[in-house]
Protein backbone atom coordinates (compact mmCIF):
# COMPACT_ATOMS: atom_id res chain seq x y z
CA UNK A 1 0.00 0.00 0.00
CA UNK A 2 1.19 3.43 -0.71
CA UNK A 3 1.37 6.26 1.78
CA UNK A 4 -1.70 8.14 0.45
CA UNK A 5 -4.00 5.11 0.89
CA UNK A 6 -2.83 4.57 4.45
CA UNK A 7 -3.25 8.26 5.17
CA UNK A 8 -6.80 8.29 3.72
CA UNK A 9 -7.83 5.18 5.66
CA UNK A 10 -6.44 6.67 8.89
CA UNK A 11 -8.30 9.95 8.35
CA UNK A 12 -11.53 8.09 7.54
CA UNK A 13 -11.16 5.98 10.69
CA UNK A 14 -10.57 9.07 12.84
CA UNK A 15 -13.57 10.89 11.35
CA UNK A 16 -15.84 7.90 11.92
CA UNK A 17 -14.61 7.58 15.49
CA UNK A 18 -15.25 11.27 16.18
CA UNK A 19 -18.69 11.10 14.56
CA UNK A 20 -19.72 8.06 16.59
CA UNK A 21 -18.59 9.75 19.82
CA UNK A 22 -20.46 12.98 19.09
CA UNK A 23 -23.73 11.41 17.91
CA UNK A 24 -26.23 11.32 20.78
CA UNK A 25 -27.34 7.84 21.65
CA UNK A 26 -31.10 7.40 22.00
CA UNK A 27 -32.09 4.40 24.08
CA UNK A 28 -34.57 2.23 22.21
CA UNK A 29 -34.55 -0.89 24.35
CA UNK A 30 -35.41 -1.72 27.92
CA UNK A 31 -37.23 0.26 30.56
CA UNK A 32 -37.57 4.00 30.24
CA UNK A 33 -38.34 6.66 32.78
CA UNK A 34 -39.05 10.26 31.88
CA UNK A 35 -40.12 13.26 33.95
CA UNK A 36 -41.75 16.43 32.67
CA UNK A 37 -42.33 19.78 34.33
CA UNK A 38 -45.90 20.62 33.41
CA UNK A 39 -48.63 23.22 33.82
CA UNK A 40 -51.43 21.16 35.35
CA UNK A 41 -53.79 23.18 37.54
CA UNK A 42 -56.43 20.80 38.89
CA UNK A 43 -57.22 17.23 39.88
CA UNK A 44 -59.45 17.06 36.78
CA UNK A 45 -56.42 17.87 34.60
CA UNK A 46 -54.47 15.14 36.37
CA UNK A 47 -57.24 12.54 35.96
CA UNK A 48 -57.81 13.32 32.27
CA UNK A 49 -54.11 13.34 31.38
CA UNK A 50 -53.45 10.16 33.34
CA UNK A 51 -56.34 8.43 31.53
CA UNK A 52 -54.98 9.50 28.11
CA UNK A 53 -51.38 8.50 28.85
CA UNK A 54 -52.29 5.16 30.45
CA UNK A 55 -53.84 4.00 27.17
CA UNK A 56 -50.55 4.48 25.31
CA UNK A 57 -48.53 1.37 24.34
CA UNK A 58 -45.75 0.37 26.70
CA UNK A 59 -46.82 2.53 29.65
CA UNK A 60 -46.04 0.78 32.93
CA UNK A 61 -46.71 3.48 35.51
CA UNK A 62 -47.65 7.15 35.61
CA UNK A 63 -47.18 9.42 38.63
CA UNK A 64 -48.48 12.97 38.42
CA UNK A 65 -47.63 15.35 41.27
CA UNK A 66 -49.95 18.35 41.05
CA UNK A 67 -48.26 20.29 43.87
CA UNK A 68 -44.96 20.49 42.01
CA UNK A 69 -46.37 20.02 38.47
CA UNK A 70 -44.27 16.98 37.64
CA UNK A 71 -45.31 14.05 35.46
CA UNK A 72 -43.25 10.84 35.74
CA UNK A 73 -43.79 8.05 33.22
CA UNK A 74 -42.27 4.58 33.35
CA UNK A 75 -42.48 2.83 29.98
CA UNK A 76 -41.03 0.25 27.59
CA UNK A 77 -38.70 1.97 25.10
CA UNK A 78 -39.46 -0.65 22.45
CA UNK A 79 -43.09 0.44 22.41
CA UNK A 80 -42.98 4.19 23.01
CA UNK A 81 -40.70 7.23 23.24
CA UNK A 82 -40.05 10.36 25.27
CA UNK A 83 -40.86 12.48 22.20
CA UNK A 84 -44.27 10.84 21.85
CA UNK A 85 -45.18 11.51 25.49
CA UNK A 86 -44.06 15.14 25.13
CA UNK A 87 -46.32 15.57 22.08
CA UNK A 88 -49.28 13.94 23.82
CA UNK A 89 -48.98 16.16 26.90
CA UNK A 90 -48.67 19.28 24.75
CA UNK A 91 -51.60 18.17 22.57
CA UNK A 92 -53.68 17.95 25.76
CA UNK A 93 -52.87 21.64 26.33
CA UNK A 94 -50.15 21.44 28.95
CA UNK A 95 -46.49 22.38 29.09
CA UNK A 96 -44.15 19.39 28.82
CA UNK A 97 -40.58 20.39 29.64
CA UNK A 98 -38.42 17.29 30.04
CA UNK A 99 -36.50 17.16 33.30
CA UNK A 100 -33.07 15.76 32.52
CA UNK A 101 -31.31 13.82 35.25
CA UNK A 102 -27.96 15.23 36.31
CA UNK A 103 -25.07 12.90 35.71
CA UNK A 104 -23.13 11.89 38.79
CA UNK A 105 -20.08 14.06 39.26
CA UNK A 106 -21.27 16.96 37.09
CA UNK A 107 -22.33 19.29 39.90
CA UNK A 108 -19.81 22.13 39.86
CA UNK A 109 -21.64 24.32 42.39
CA UNK A 110 -19.59 23.11 45.36
Image (cartoon, grey):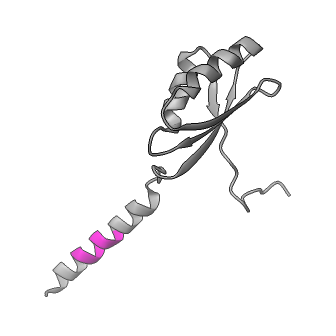
Between 16 and 97, the residue placed more toward the observer is 97
Quadrant into which the N terminus falls: bottom left
Q: Would you identify the image quadrant in which residue 15 lies?
A: bottom left
- Rendering coords of residue 39 (x, y %): 70, 20
Q: Can you give x and y, in whole percent of width and height, for residue 81 in the image?
A: 49, 38
- Indicate whether residue 9 is drawn in magenta: yes
Relative vertical location of residue 45 with respect to residue 17 in this rendering, above or below: above
Tell me where residue 87 appears, x and y as whole percent.
Answer: 51, 25
When the figure is inspected, residue 74 is found, relative to residue 48, above or below; the finding is below
Q: Quadrant of residue 50?
A: top right
Q: Residue at x 51, y 38 (%)?
A: 58
- Report the residue at 18% width, 85% height from top: 3
Q: Is residue 28 visible?
A: yes
Q: Position of residue 60 (x, y in %)?
A: 59, 39
Q: Residue at x 28, y 77 (%)?
A: 10
Tell me, yes or no, if residue 41 can be seen here.
no
What residue span does the magenta drawing correspond to? 8-14
Q: Residue furthest right?
A: 110
Q: Is the C terminus in the top left, top right, bottom left or bottom right quadrant?
A: bottom right
Amino acid sequence: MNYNKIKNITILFLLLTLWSCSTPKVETKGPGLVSFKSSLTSETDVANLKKNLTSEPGVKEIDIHLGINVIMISFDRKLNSVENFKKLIEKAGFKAEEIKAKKKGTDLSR
